[in-house]
Structures are given as C-alpha cells and as structure tokens.
Image (cartoon, helix red, strand yellow):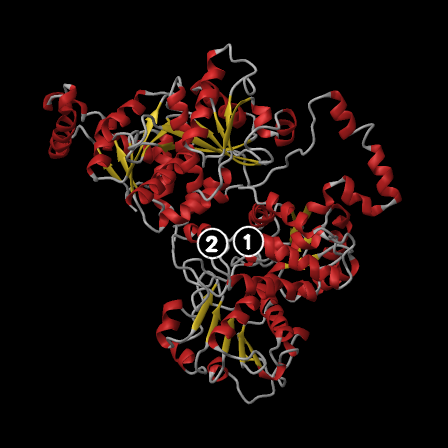
Amino acid sequence: MATVTKEAALDYHEEGRPGKIEITPTKPYASQLDLSLAYSPGVAYPCLEIEQNPQDAYRYTNKGNLVAVISNGTAVLGLGDIGALAGKPVMEGKALLFKIFSGLDAFDIEINETDPDKFVEIVKSLAPTFGGINLEDIKAPECFKIEQRLKAECDIPVMHDDQHGTAIISGAGLLNALEIQKKNIGEIRLVVNGAGAAAISCTRLYKALGVKAENIVMCDSKGVIRADRENLTDQKREFATTRDIHTLAEAMKGADVFLGLSVAGVVTPEMVRSMAPRPIVFALANPNPEIDYYAAKEAAPDVIVATGRSDYPNQINNVIGFPYIFRGALDCGASAINEEMKVAAVYAISELAKEPVPSVVDEAYGLSDLHFGPDLILPKALDPRLLLRVAPAVAKAAMASGIARRPITDWDQYQLKLRAYMGDDGKFMRTVSEHVRKDKKRVVFTEGNLENMLRAATRLYNENTVEPVLLGNAEMINRHASRLGLDISGIQIINPRHDRQEAAREKYARMLSEAKQREGVSFAEALDKVYDRSYFGMMMVQCGDADALVAGCYSAANKMAQRAASIVGIREGFDHFATVHIMNTRCGTYFLADTAINPVSDTDALVDIARLTDQAVRHFNQEPVMAMLSFSNFGSNHESTEPSRVAEAVKILHEKYPSIMVDGEMQADYALNAELRDKAYPFNTIKGKNVNTLIFPNLSSANIGYKLLLGMGVGKAIGPLQVGLKKPIYFASVNARPDAIVDIATLAALDAITSQR
C-alpha cells in the first residue's frame, strides 16, 4: 500500500492550481456572438423559457448534471468536528470522485451552521441550483433530521452518503457473502457494533433485504442497546433488544454476521471463534478495523472478512455506489432517491461481482485470478462496468416507482451516453500505478541533482511505486534535497565518477566495448564513456542492475535517443523506435506519435511508428483507430513530398499489416470528425469509427501539436511512452513538472514488468 505522508498530501493539494477541482466552459466563447449568446442579450431567452416551465432548466442549464456536496464539518472522516472550512478538502475530494467515476459535475459547499433547522433552510434555498444533493460528514443524530426534512421539502434527489452509501455497498457484499457461506438472510443472527448514522442506515437496509428484526443486536460504547436502557435516541430505540445480553462478547456468541462501524480493536479472535460456523465479519472502522483481517482469518479460517481498507480483500468502499446512484437518478429526472433505488443499486452491485472480471481490472490491481469468492464479494472500485450497471438499475427503479420526471426510453442510447462519460480524468495512470506497485521495479534517474527529478523520485518512493535510484554527486543531491525539505534518506544515490564505482565502470566498459568492438569502440573509449551518467545508467539497465531508466533531455530528438538505441538496441522486426504521448481530454483519450525521437520520418519510419503505436495502444486495452496525418487529404496534394510519403506508408500498412485499422493521409479535422470525413471521403477504411490514434508526418508537427494542446489546457499529457527499444529507456524533459516525471517513471516500470513477462 502506498505511504501517504503529510508532505506528499500537502504538495498534492497545493501544486499548480490549489485544490482539486475547477470550472470549465462547455460552449464556445471566442467571438462577440458567442458572448452575446452566453450572456446578454441571448441568455434572456432560456430564462423566460424556464420561467414558463421550470423543468426546462434541465434543457438549458447544467442542473441535470450538477450535484452539491454539502457539509457542516461536524463529522469529517475520522477527524470529527473540525468545522466547515477544515472539511473543505474532503468535500472537494468527493466532488472529484463524482467527476472521474460518473462524469457528474459537483460543487462543494461548506456551511458554517450546526443548528439542524437553520442548516436545512440554507440548503433548501440553494437547491434550485442543483440536480441532486449529496450530504456529507454531518454528525448523528442531527444528520437523520436534516436528511429527512430535505428529502421531504426538496424536489431533487437528496442522500446522506455516510448513511446510505455504506449501507448499499455493504448490503451487496452481505448478499454475496451469505450466498458463498450458504446461509439464508431470513435466518441469520446479526450483531452491529456502533450506532451512528452509517450503522443505523446499514441495519435498516439489511432489514429491507430480509434480515429479521428479532435477530438483530446493536451495541454502542455502553454495550448492548437494550429496551430497558434510559435516554435512548429514537434511532437506537428502533433496534433495542429485550434479550438478556449486555456485552459485545455475549452478543457475538452464535452470531452469523458481525457489522462493525465503531472503533479499532474491539473484536477479539475469541469473539470470532464464538460465532456460528462459516461466519461473516464486516469490520469497517477506518483506518484500522475492529479486528485485523489476518487475525480474523486465523481465528476462523472459514470466515469471510470485509474492511474499509484497500490493502485487504473485500473493501467496502462508498465510491462503488454514490457516483452511479446519482448518475442514474439525475439522468431520469428522479425527484428523490428512494428505497427502491437503493435496493436496485444493491442488487446491481451484487450481481456484477459474480461476473468474470475483465482483464483491465486484473491489471489495475496487479492480479490475474480475481474471481467471485470469499476474497471477492464486491466489484473492485476501478471496475469500469459499475457505471454501466448501477446507473441504469437505479434509473429503472426510479421509473418503476413513479418518481422519474424524464423517463429514459432508449436504453441502448443511454449505454452509449454512459460510455462517453468514461473519460480518463486520471484513471489511466491510477490503473498503471496500482499495477506497478505489485511488482516494484528499480528505476534510475540520470539527472538526480535536478529539483523536479528529486521531487518525482521522493514521491515515487513515498508512494511505494518504484525503487528510485539517483545518479549524481551525493553531497550535492543531499544538499538540494535538504533545501527543498525532502527526505531522501531511503533513496539510493550513485555517483558514476566516485572511486566506489570503479568495479561497476570496468564491468560496464568491458560489456560496452565487446558489444561495439566492430564499431571501433575500444575498452579505453568505453571506460571514458561510462563516467557519463547517461551511459552509466543505460548500462545498469542493459546489465540487469536496474530495471528501467529515465534520462533527462533538453529537447526532442536529443542525443540520448541515439545513445539508447546504440546501447540497448531496437526490437527485432523494426528499424526505428519512437515515443507516444497519451493525451487525456474532455473528448476522450488520444495517442500521439512520434513526439520525441525521429526528426524526419521517411516512409519506412512512418510504417514502424504506426506498427509500434498500434501495439502500445492495444497494450492498454484499447482498440486503436489510426489516422496518418498531413496537410493533404487522400491525394489532394501529392505534388509535395510529405503527403505522398504518408500515403505510401498507408499503402504498405494496408498491404502488409491489414489488421491495423489505419487510413490517411488526412488533415487533423477530418481525422477527428468521423461525420466530416465519411461524407467527404466515403471510401475511407475507418468509416464510421472515431479515431483515437494520430500518427504525425514529422517530429516538428507532433511535438508542436501536443505541446499546443497542453499549453492551451485542452487536456493532460502523459508520457512520452517509449516504444521500440529492447529495454525500458525513457526520456523526460529536464524542465518537466514532477508529476509528469512520476508518470514517465511509472510507465517505464510497467514496460519493465511487461518485458520481463
């Protein structure tokens, strides 16, 4: 599990634009006409339409795709009552999760009010802005009253996720755990430890799923909640028992299921052993559960255990539910999130867990044997199918229960709409990082003394992603790190020029001279070369002393590229290698090549670049649809050398590599607009398909193109990804941001894992 340090967390929130979210325009605004339509006088027309028909707000504004994440900061995560302002980073984080998992926009709203009635009035006055309200981190028992009133007094979906999110996810897990343990939900005995908002909501939902009230025992910090106890809240009185038991240990005897939403360490191995055969333990206290996962498994080998932690099997994670529940509710215009919709979400999540796990999920978690069973009772949080299953199930339940104001009629079209929301927004690199952590590789940085490289290496080390090695003068590197406040005590530093590296230099020089002796490289010349950090680092990778290398470069087509090709070699079957930048944009993910290596690409180079890029895109579980770009369309300007060279490359690809989905030469607008392309050139071989891979005719256009997109804020660039060398030698600009270098090093480590396999 990655180590989260205070420094890394603060840097993450502060670097670049402070915070985690921003507002992005969705309509043109370049011309005076655009501005007149966006504001005065054009904006008056939708205002008048909405005045006549309030539901038209969903047609003319973002209301139908906008959720409010609202809190007063009285019960923030495990931090307690820290106040509205201090809770803002959490609410921003929740807004980010809405966006990346379901495409919903979200505003975080922190209200400095603890009086429930006043809080409700404030939220009600804000409700017209939003399509839904996600209440967050509000303490019990006030949260019950607040949610109840807002649901009754607002005409949009309202859900307190701390209550219902945990209930829905754990409810799905409970159904599947009972199926595996061969137990009937109507017969089980349930013990609940904790009586806060989440515990109450979970228990209510479990009753709706079939658990009998007389078989439930709830405990709080004072022990079993009994009917004869004084001063019980209405919520606790709902689950008070008349059984003659007083302690958690007594309640656990013979129980089938334990649900903990309390504090760490309250359950002992003896308590687990006292449960019924084939028990189920949901120990959901965070960050440390009521009983350690392995302690519970040792106490009862046939137990199924779930926790709130990502480093154990069966994580009960609210992100499996809330983005998709709100997505479905807003898409059908639901006026609320009712019990039918929650139960529909439970069953959709439960059923998905039983289906074969796609390879993209296996790779995200670095596993190859994920399947339904005691260690997988729920879908993984990064399973992309959740959006496609849970949102429609919720929408259908809203329609069946009569609260959908804009019923969905074309479910096939709705599936396409949901898939369009599955843009990357960081999921790509999260998936790669999770995979790399499972098989940590040694990655060398040639420019260990640079601030950005130091920051990147420190982050990679703290996140347990790779084992970084810094090349350079140790005294200088440590002095820079100290000045920057970076702890690099756990990171190895190697100075290729130091006397301690004499044996390594001789070893690398001998191997290099032997490999290059027919090219006139003597041992003495090779020995002189390996004093250089880039030669030394590349030889570390070539000899297996490191797994991958990130070389600092001052420009594209840098001498580092030729040096790497000379030392580690180009893959068999190719005469060239290249780099690919991955651009994550609002319109989807695009792969651009070659962005850093080949200054002038002749026909053979273009063919190699296309083949290598096709393989790279497929490696990331995407189907490449490729356009070979130029300033000409399908022969319209073959008097010029470049278009004819591109056209010839396409011809060779069609003849020799028919499985590659490619066409050209074509201009960029025709490549990216299938309707425009197909209308003008109906004979094209990628007709009806959206291009996601762009091959540029030369390095200048590729390098300028992706940097223009990056500079204009159109998307985020990941890379460059190196394709075609025999070993993972990657290239990073010496001026790159630390997060970009982190991405490059992570991709290099993934390359090393793949190469070794």
588 sits to left or right of 484: right
Which residue, given by chain and number where applicable, does mark 1 sit on? 385
The amino acid marked with disc number 2 is Pro
* Point 36% across, 30% down: residue: 451
- Farthest residue to the top: give it: 639
440 sits to left or right of 227: left
User: Residue 611: x percent and y percent?
Assistant: 40, 32
User: Residue 596: x percent and y percent?
Assistant: 40, 24
* Point 16% across, 28% down: residue: 515
The amino acid marked with disc number 1 is Arg
Query: Can residue 589 be seen at all in this image of the molecule?
Result: yes
- Farthest residue to the bottom: give it: 244
Residue 508 drawn above or below residue 213: above
Which residue, given by chain and number where applicable, does mark 2 sit on? 358
Cα separation, mark 2 vs mark 1, equals 9 Å
Residues packed near mark 1 inside 10 Å, few (<14), some (14 to 19) or many (20 plus): some
SS of the residue under disc 2: loop
Residue 362 drawn above or below residue 378: above
Q: Of 217 and 616, which appears nearest the observer?
A: 616
Q: Are marks 2 and 1 in contact (CB under 8 Å)?
A: yes
Q: Earlier in the sequence, mark 2 or mark 1?
A: 2
457 sits to left or right of 260: left
